[in-house]
Image: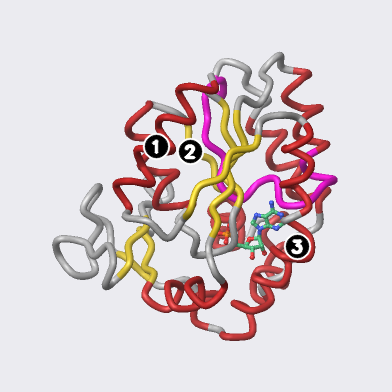
Amino acid sequence: MRVVLIGPPGSGKGTQGTRLRDRLSLEYIATGNILRDAVARKSAAGLEAKPYLDRGQLVPDELVNRLVAELFSDPTRLTHFVMDGYPRTLAQAQAFDELLESHGLPLTAAIQFAIADEEVVRRLDGRRMCGNAECSAVYHMKNNPPAVPGVCDRCGSPLSQRLDDKENDAIWSRLRSYHQVTEELLDYYQKRGVLHRISAQQDIDLIHQQLVDITQESA
Ligand code: AMP
């Protein structure tokens, strides 16, 4: 089971990706989380990525591809995974395919999360994230609240709002990149025969079940 989730910010990739991880014992990899962690640690990669994250722009392909390739450098670790937020450009998708091929781990499904822009903007406002990088569970204050306000149900860590979810400019910039750049991937994966599409505006449990079915059937 090797799956990539494709959708705009706020379409539920994090919520569903972490649930899929827990249900099917997959590795959950979110390049956004890896980059935010690098920024917080002030590593070389973090310093390079920070201005892009702050503005809601895509980080250069070369940097993201390198970080992802590093994750695969231990071949015993990543064989079954769900990828959230990578690839996001055609160049990343091609590099990722080459990487997976070199490890004999072809992608089994690319799943599109379809959602209207207005719904994205509404959702990002209420989104809260677990600060524990090992957990990364995602909540929404109204649609998917934690049992105790401000605390992660799964691991008990504090929840917070992402900086790029507060800034209107950053939100629209991320949506533009999605439509102008990332949507090209749909055609790419369609031609490779691995694309599936789900509506991200259904009930959370229903989407989860659809994802489980697609992931298992495509493996
Ligand atoms: P996310 O958490 O997926 O919304 O990502 C947050 C931010 O990290 C994005 O707005 C980009 O600045 C950066 N980022 C994450 N993944 C990628 C990627 N695959 N390519 C380029 N930039 C990325």
Asked whether, in this view, residue 144 is left or right of residue 164, the answer is: left
Q: Nearer the viewer, mark 2 or mark 3?
A: 2
The residue most toward the left is: 148
* Residue under the point 82% across and 47% down: 90
Q: Which residue is mark 2?
A: 28
Q: Amino acid at mark 2?
A: Tyr
Residue 215 higher or lower than 143, as above or below = above
Residue 69, image quadrant: top right
Q: Which mark is residue 20?
A: 1
**Towards the viewer: 143 or 45:** 143
Residue 29 higher or lower than 159, as above or below = above
Q: Which residue is mark 3?
A: 48
- Residue 164 image position (x, y, % from top left): 55, 75
- Residue 141 image position (x, y, % from top left): 28, 72
Residue 215 higher or lower than 208, as above or below = above
Callout 1 touching callout 2 (CB < 8 Å): yes
Residue stretch rendered in magenta on the structure = 77-93
N-terminal of the pair, mark 2 or mark 3, is 2
* Label 3 secondary element: helix
* Residue under the point 61% across and 49% down: 6
Mark 2, ligand 1, within 8 Å: the answer is: no
Asked whether, in this view, residue 34 is left or right of residue 136, the answer is: right
Indicate yes or no whether the magenta region holds residue 83: yes
Mark 3: few, some, or many residues within 10 Å (few <14, many ≥20)?
A: some
Callout 2 touching callout 3 (CB < 8 Å): no
Q: Which mark is residue 82?
A: none
Alpha-carbon distance for marks 1 and 2? 8 Å
